[in-house]
Amino acid sequence: MRVMLRAHMDTAASNEGIKSGALPTVIQKFMEKVKPEAAYFGLHEGVRSCWIVFDLEDSSKLPALLEDMFLHFNAELEIGPVMNREELAKGLAAMASSPS
């Protein structure tokens, strides 16, 4: 299932992660594990943030995937299913063809 992760990273913790080299290491390790379809980095609500879209084959993998962001950066994480344009069209077409 395609999901999008949104992570807000604590400023003090991510500052330390930049100084120690942990921030790029943790991000690179995560990217290698999930092989994202897309990844964006910037500010949201005034803190370092990222949005990463990837395929989640098994939800039981979430603890291992996300723990480094919690431990190193006191991150606030949200993850949820998302669709691309074609998938949305398919879902809407299925709704239109099914009786209500």
Image (spheres, rainbow, N blue to C red):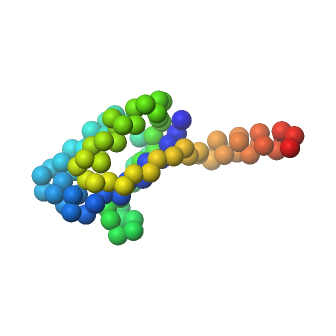
Image spot of residue 99 (x, y percent) = 87, 40
Image spot of residue 34 (x, y percent) = 38, 36
Q: How many marks?
A: 0
The vertical placement of 61 against 27, above or below, is above
Can residue 41 be seen here? The reply is no
Image spot of residue 11 (x, y percent) = 25, 63
The vertical placement of 23 against 33, above or below, is below
Left/right of residue 84 with respect to residue 63 in the rendered view: right
The vertical placement of 29 against 46, above or below, is above
Image spot of residue 53 (x, y percent) = 46, 45
In which quadrant will I find the C terminus?
Answer: top right
Question: Looking at this view, is 67 or 57 the one in front?
Answer: 67
* Residue projecting furthest to the left: 20
Can residue 2 be seen here? The reply is yes
In which quadrant will I find the N terminus?
Answer: top right
Question: Looking at this view, is 88 or 48 the one in front?
Answer: 48
Left/right of residue 100 with respect to residue 11 in the rendered view: right
Left/right of residue 19 with respect to residue 27 in the rendered view: left
Q: Residue at x 31, y 61 (%)?
A: 48
